[in-house]
Amino acid sequence: MAPPLLHLKEIGIRFGSEPLLKGAELQVGEGERICLVGRNGSGKSTLLKIAAGMIEPDSGEHFLQPGRTLRYLPQEPDLSGYKTVLEYAEAGLAPGDDHYRAQYLLNVLGLEGNEDPAKLSGGEAKRAAIARALAPEPDILLLDEPTNHLDLPVIEWLEAELKQMKSAIVLISHDRRFLENLSRVTVWIDRGVSRRNEQGFAEFEAWRDKVFEEEEKEQARLSEKIRQEEHWMIYGVTARRKRNMRRVRELADLRQQKKEHRGPQGTVKMTVSEAETSGKLVSEAKGIGKSYGGRPIVKGFSTRIARGDRVGFVGPNGAGKTTLLKMLTGELTPDDGTMRLGASLEMVTLDQKREKLDPNDTLASVLTGGRGDMVILGDQSKHVMSYMKDFLFTPEQGRTPVKVLSGGERGRLLLARALATPSNLLVLDEPTNDLDLETLDLLQELIADYSGTVLLVSHDRDFLDRICTSVITMEGDGLWREYAGGYSDMVAQRGAGVDAKREAKALKAKARQENAEAAEPAKPAKKSGLSFTQQHRLKALPDEIAALEQKIAKAQKLLEDPSLFSANPDRFHKTTQQVGKLHELLDALEEEWLELEGLAEGA
């Protein structure tokens, strides 16, 4: 068996009175794809920083094979000290690395390279950091929440790029679909120790539940053994004559073992305060439009949202999702068309950027609105400290300021406040950011039980699939369209992400061509031409492509019928699969046409 590229052994580290990690291990082999999972605050990011050599543990061993390269992608990249984004990206390269690859990756990720790092948004900074980490094509990639702040086209591109890389990867992410598609090994950090399963994230939950089940059985056996030993100690004949000191010591050890056992971390208990039922109609748009600076953000969009619908909004960053959402909820007036809102709407919004939290406010004050110590939940009230425990906050945190919270804790606090406010319309803007997987599961269950309407903006494909009854996505040039079903249904109907992938392919081809031209001296043009068969094929392809586009348009028109999904789900799913296959065939024909056209132009 080949030695590991990286091995962390018996890692221990303490922050404050309690140890964060105690005896944790991480072993990374050649080309392995490992996902690192665990609750918020369990020590995942700390272990990754120890692996990257950024933190020195209190105890344990750190081994990296000599000559091997390692790159680390932080959750919050720091670009300070660099004049341009390109300079920052190239700083991750080693002597002998291809410097053009940094520029190529920046371009694919939507950056030019001459941007001022101080003026980047969170998403742009993350994309620059991804380019820096991937450019050297290292032996080991350590990625901490790489999909945070990224939109769907970039997430799908990154997933495809990581799949084809030869690097070993250790990955932390809250994006289930991303983890399932990339991981082959799972390392679970739980109560300071690590457990390893030679299966990907898709099998994690079943494995975790089995571990907890075995642990419960073991604790039951331990309790029974203590009971038997205590009975012997008090009533045993031998004990009345003389004490068996060995059994006394064993009983003391058993009691200490039970005392020191830490059960699984608490679970979030979510309840939602529901207002009076709204009318059947929640929002109706007819031909609405909005433009900024002459650029159409939304154009001629119509929809009808009814009580109980769960509608997802997807698209690239800057596409106008928030603008459309604000028009549909009455916060923004459209330039064109008409909007109608239902009766008795009580809306609560979960803010993506956490800006609605006063950093100097205490947790208790945020949840009570500064009014007493009770949280009102519908027609009931609950003490704020008890309500905080439902969201995994300790009583000691009640009087601490918001500014000391981590991103995940802020997310939980916003959830707690939003769900305590009576509502029949929930507007969730990126609610999955920084939440651990167990909290996401409970949020999903809560939304499923919520009798009101949910409008959801998210880049989390799995969450969209689990929640949505329909998805609204940008088609380009201000056009938006609604598709029945979740994210995967929408992908099958329209081929989401195809445009982004084509752009990446084109840039990659361009990069190869420019590299080849730079490496080789100029040569006289060589004549080339098409064979008779290729010429015939080039003439026939446009008609085939047009016919295929007509078939796709016809099938999509059928899918646009809002009654199809409920009236004939089998036909809906068959048509959805057909559209997906037609899109794949269309891509192949277009690539064939481009290749032949290129050969013809070179003649």
Image (spheres, grey):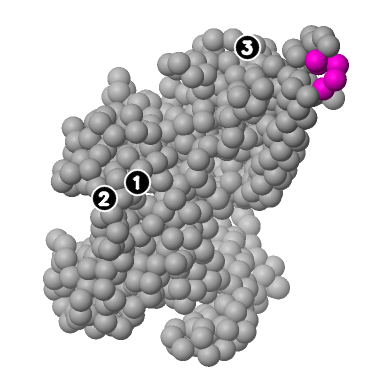
Q: To which quarter of the image does residue 142 belong?
A: top right
Are discs 1 and 2 less than 8 Å apart at CB? yes
Q: To which quarter of the image does residue 17 belong?
A: top left
Question: Relative to 65, is 559 on the left or the right?
Answer: left
Residue carrying label 1: 387
Residue 354: percent from left, percent from top: 27, 44
Residue carrying label 3: 60
Q: CA distance from mark 3 to mark 2?
A: 45 Å
Residue 200: percent from left, percent from top: 68, 44
Q: CA distance from mark 1 to mark 2?
A: 7 Å
Screen quadrant of the N terminus: top right
Up-down: is 346 above or below 29?
A: below
Residue carrying label 2: 375
Labelled disc at residue 168: none
User: Which is nearer the eye, 368 or 476?
Assistant: 368
Up-down: is 228 above or below 549?
A: above
Q: Tag 1 or tag 3, which sits nearer the N-term?
A: 3
